[in-house]
């Protein structure tokens, strides 16, 4: 999955020459083979490198605080989201939902690499949510829908239908 994410990220960043990737180990850690330097390994390391190669440093955060927040969410993605068990999904969605209560994006009001990689990381979770679950995690659903419509982000993933209005109203069933 990480290799598709990195290819999609390259396209979103407008990088012309596709890189060569492989994986290593049981967890299939992505590795970027570079012709003019050592190989880079790890999703976050490679994604950060690609952002810098594309001269899109703003995607890593505009200020020291925003850069730290972006790094925090990138770390959350690889430590909590990747490989999460079914019983961890509700905790992840609850944490994200609470965090996104007063934010447009993970680093506040600015779209960053954290939004892209978190979107890729939770797509398989959101696509399986029932309508009622999407309503329960309304902030995550709003953020997810916003990110999936961001230019060039969705690439290899199918769109997820997100209802804009509530299906159930009070006691009028």
Image: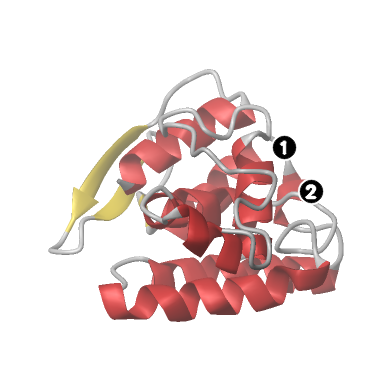
Q: Which mark is residue 120?
A: none
Query: Which of the two marks, 1 or 2, is nearer to us in this view?
Result: 2
Q: Splitting the image into 4 quarters, where does residue 90 fall?
A: bottom left
Query: Does 100 sit above or below residue 57?
Result: below
Query: Does 88 sit above or below residue 39?
Result: below
Across and down, in percent, residue 19 comes to 40, 30
Q: Residue at x 48, y 28 (%)?
A: 155
Q: Quadrant of the C terminus?
A: bottom right
Q: Residue at x 57, y 68 (%)?
A: 136
Residues at circles 1 and 2 in contact by the CB criterion of under 8 Å: no
In terms of depth relative to the viewer, which is nearer, 18 or 11?
11
Query: Does 10 sit above or below residue 94?
Result: above
Check disc 2 and report the residue beneath it. Answer: 58
Across and down, in percent, residue 44 comes to 48, 59
Judged left or right of residue 171, residue 84 is left
Examine the rendering and report whether any part of residue 36 can be seen. no
Query: Does 102 sit above or below residue 117?
Result: below
CA separation, marks 1 and 2?
9 Å
Check disc 1 and report the residue beneath it. Answer: 55
Judged left or right of residue 166, residue 162 is left
Q: Judging from the image, what secondary structure is the residue with disc 1 in? A: loop
Examine the rendering and report whether any part of residue 63 can be seen. yes
């Amino acid at each position: 999955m990480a290799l598709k994410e990195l290819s999609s990220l390259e396209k979103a960043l407008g990088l012309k020459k596709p890189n060569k990737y492989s994986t290593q180990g049981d967890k299939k850690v992505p590795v970027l083979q570079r012709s003019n330097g050592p190989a880079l390994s790890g999703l976050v390391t490679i994604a950060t490198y690609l952002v810098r190669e594309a001269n899109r440093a703003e995607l890593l955060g505009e200020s020291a605080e925003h850069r730290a927040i972006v790094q925090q969410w990138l770390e959350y993605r690889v430590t909590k989201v990747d490989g999460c068990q079914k019983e961890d999904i509700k905790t992840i969605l609850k944490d994200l939902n609470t965090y996104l209560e007063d934010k447009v994006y993970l680093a506040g009001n600015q779209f960053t690499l954290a939004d892209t990689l978190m979107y890729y990381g939770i797509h398989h979770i959101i696509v399986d949510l029932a309508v009622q679950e999407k309503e329960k995690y309304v902030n995550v659903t709003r953020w997810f829908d916003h990110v999936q419509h961001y230019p060039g982000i969705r690439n290899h993933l199918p769109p997820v239908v997100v209802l804009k209005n509530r299906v159930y109203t009070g006691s009028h069933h």
